[in-house]
Image (spheres, rainbow, N blue to C red):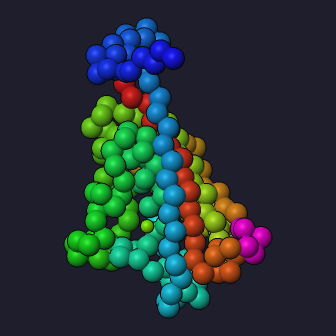
Amino acid sequence: MNIKLTTSSDFEMAEERLRASRISAGPEFRIGQGFDVHTFGEGDHVILCGVKIPHGNALMGHSDADVGLHALTDALLGAIGDGDIGAHFPPSDPKWRGASSDQFLLDAANRVSARNGLIVNVDVTLICETPKIGPHRQAMRDCIAEILQIDVTRVSVKATTTEGLGFTGRGEGIAAQASAMVQLG
Ligand code: MG
């Protein structure tokens, strides 16, 4: 069997072809996805997608434990291949204790801007039995749109339960996943 090993010059040629095709094909689009989980502990409110919601438990975490903004931050970082939230804001650093997560998301947005990138749209799914997300959905979309400085029509916040199954079903915590599309100029 004749296997051709890929060399670094092959990669360079492929990259050059990609650059050339990008010029003729227009802008390049990138997609990223993020996922996060935080556990419930003692407290009287949660912060989800920047919105404070009264609740019988709080989410535990080094920062404000905003699982929605954390997943979205990772989605943006994923779209530009720039590590993850833990790499840029290590939980071991006392500086981020109790930190408001909007600054994590803003940092990711600034990293997109530094690449001459535009955020096309973002989509967050919160996975939990409680609290009910519907009454707060618009406030969450408004908050994310303001942090990212994009029109609210480009921001989606969705919610689902896991029908009582698994750790979210047992009410042990909240999970979130997010997608982001970025246009690089
Ligand atoms: Mg987190």
Q: Is residue 122 above or below residue 56?
A: above
Residue 116, quarter of the rendered image: top left
Magenta stretch contains residue 162: yes
Please tell me whether the stretch drawn in magenta is mainly helix, strand or loop.
loop
In this picture, which residue range is highlighted in magenta?
Answer: 161-165
Residue at point 58%, 72% (across, down): 174
- Please indicate, yes or no, whether residue 121 appears anywhere in the rendered image: yes
Ligand 1 positioned in quadrant: bottom left
On the image, the x and y values in percent for residue 39 come to 52, 78
Residue at point 49%, 53% (across, down): 34
Residue at point 57%, 49% (across, down): 123
On the image, the x and y values in percent for residue 169 come to 70, 75
Judge left or right: residue 157 versus residue 38.
right
Q: Is residue 14 above or below residue 176?
A: above
Magenta stretch contains residue 134: no
On the image, the x and y values in percent for residue 32 come to 48, 43
Give the farthest residue toward the right. 163
Of the pair 84 and 23, the residue shown nearer to us? 84
Judge left or right: residue 138 versus residue 95.
right
Q: Is residue 1 above or below residue 43?
A: above
- Please indicate, yes or no, whether residue 131 appears anywhere in the rendered image: no
